[in-house]
Image (tube, rainbow, N blue to C red):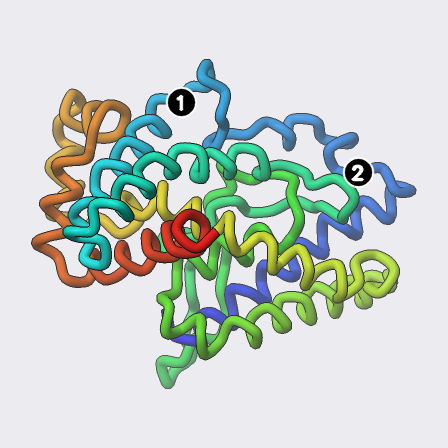
């Protein structure tokens, strides 16, 4: 995503997150979770084996483990492959423990599904993006505001972009939220100071990456793979909820863009949280 679009997204997320915080402040400190208990139900990323989406997660983890021997960086390295495959299920499962409210820090309503298909941009007459609307709140959850930022960075930007713009976007997200709080008569230094936000944002980056590892094969899958599945209910179910490993391995070898992005994601997980942990 170009930086001009990314700036609009993080500013919009900051305003969304401020709105939830303002509601809590005006309710005398009652949390959104107390006011709207359904916000605590995790629609998608749940570790509960009885959750309707449990089979999706099993298929996702099976793929993450099965594709390791094919990844460019580890191909032929039997020790690294074995260590990664043994540890990945446990590492990836950490996301299920951090998807909701974090104790001891401010939480708010988060969008929860910040990937490219859920942004609608408006351009000016010169073709420059000037406004964005966030759509599709079906995965909304009550979490620290940096949750959405971490997911957005992982899902919508690559490694080179992050090296150039991560600090800028983190600060812009907070500044947008702080400005919206001030407009509502709240003091951001009391509601959610920068020190707390930036600390949680640093911790959330790990979980954005883990979510991307699970979700990457779907969010980056081209129409040539997904369109035929949408026309066949049985094949769609097999791909989504049983086993998509072989199909994604073929995609990895055939699609250079997918291969590059998937390498970045899996290397980030394996190197940072398994091999060098």
Question: What residue is at 31 percent from the left and 48 percent from the top?
Answer: 216
Q: Nearer the viewer, mark 1 or mark 2?
A: 1
Which of pointers 1 and 2 lies earlier in the amino acid sequence?
2
Query: How packed is label 2: few (under 14 Cα within 10 Å), some, or many (20 or more)?
Result: some
Q: Is residue 78 visible?
A: yes
- In the rendered structure, find residue 24 and report the number of the disc placed on it: none
Query: How packed is label 1: few (under 14 Cα within 10 Å), some, or many (20 or more)?
Result: some
Q: Count the labels in the image.
A: 2
Observer-nearest of 127 and 201: 201
Question: What residue is at 8 percent from the left and 54 percent from the top?
Answer: 254
Q: Residue furthest front?
A: 79
Q: Secondary structure at mark 1?
A: helix
Q: Secondary structure at mark 2?
A: loop
Looking at the image, residue 237 sits to the left or right of residue 96; the answer is: left
Which residue is identified by label 1? 54
Q: Is residue 222 visible?
A: no
Task: Place residue 169 in its image quadrant.
Answer: bottom right
In contact (CB < 8 Å): disc 1 and disc 2: no
Task: Place residue 143 in its image quadrant.
Answer: top right
Which residue is identified by label 2? 31
Residue 271 in the image: state x and y as whole percent: 38, 55
Question: What residue is at 17 percent from the left and 42 percent from the top?
Answer: 248
Establish if 21 lies above or below 90.
below
Looking at the image, residue 117 sits to the left or right of residue 29; the answer is: left
Residue 88 in the image: state x and y as whole percent: 37, 38
Observer-nearest of 33 and 197: 197
Mark 1 and mark 2: Cα distance apart in space? 29 Å
Q: Quadrant of the N terminus?
A: bottom left
Task: Place residue 237 in its image quadrant.
Answer: top left
């Amino acid at each position: 995503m170009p930086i001009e679009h990314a700036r609009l997204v993080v500013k919009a997320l900051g305003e969304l997150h401020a709105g939830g915080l303002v509601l809590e402040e005006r309710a005398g400190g009652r949390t959104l979770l107390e006011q709207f208990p359904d916000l605590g139900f995790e629609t998608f990323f749940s570790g509960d084996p009885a959750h309707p989406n449990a089979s999706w997660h099993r298929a996702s983890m099976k793929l993450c483990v099965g594709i390791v021997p094919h990844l460019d960086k580890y191909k032929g390295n039997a020790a690294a492959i074995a260590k990664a495959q043994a540890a990945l299920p446990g590492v990836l499962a950490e996301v299920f423990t951090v998807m909701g409210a974090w104790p001891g820090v401010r939480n708010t309503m988060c969008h929860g599904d910040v990937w490219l298909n859920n942004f609608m941009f408006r351009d000016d007459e010169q073709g420059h993006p000037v406004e964005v609307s966030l759509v599709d709140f079906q995965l909304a959850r009550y979490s620290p505001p940096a949750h959405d930022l971490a997911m957005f960075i992982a899902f919508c930007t690559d490694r080179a972009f992050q090296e150039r713009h991560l600090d800028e976007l983190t600060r812009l997200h907070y500044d947008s939220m702080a400005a919206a709080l001030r407009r509502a008569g709240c003091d951001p230094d009391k509601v959610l100071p920068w020190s707390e936000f930036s600390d949680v944002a640093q911790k959330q980056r790990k979980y954005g990456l883990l979510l991307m590892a699970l979700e990457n094969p779907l969010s980056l899958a081209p129409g040539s793979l997904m369109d035929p599945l949408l026309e066949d209910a049985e094949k769609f179910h097999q791909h989504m909820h049983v086993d998509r490993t072989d199909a994604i391995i073929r995609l990895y070898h055939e699609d250079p863009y997918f291969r590059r992005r998937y390498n970045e994601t899996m290397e980030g997980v394996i190197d940072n949280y398994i091999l060098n942990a």
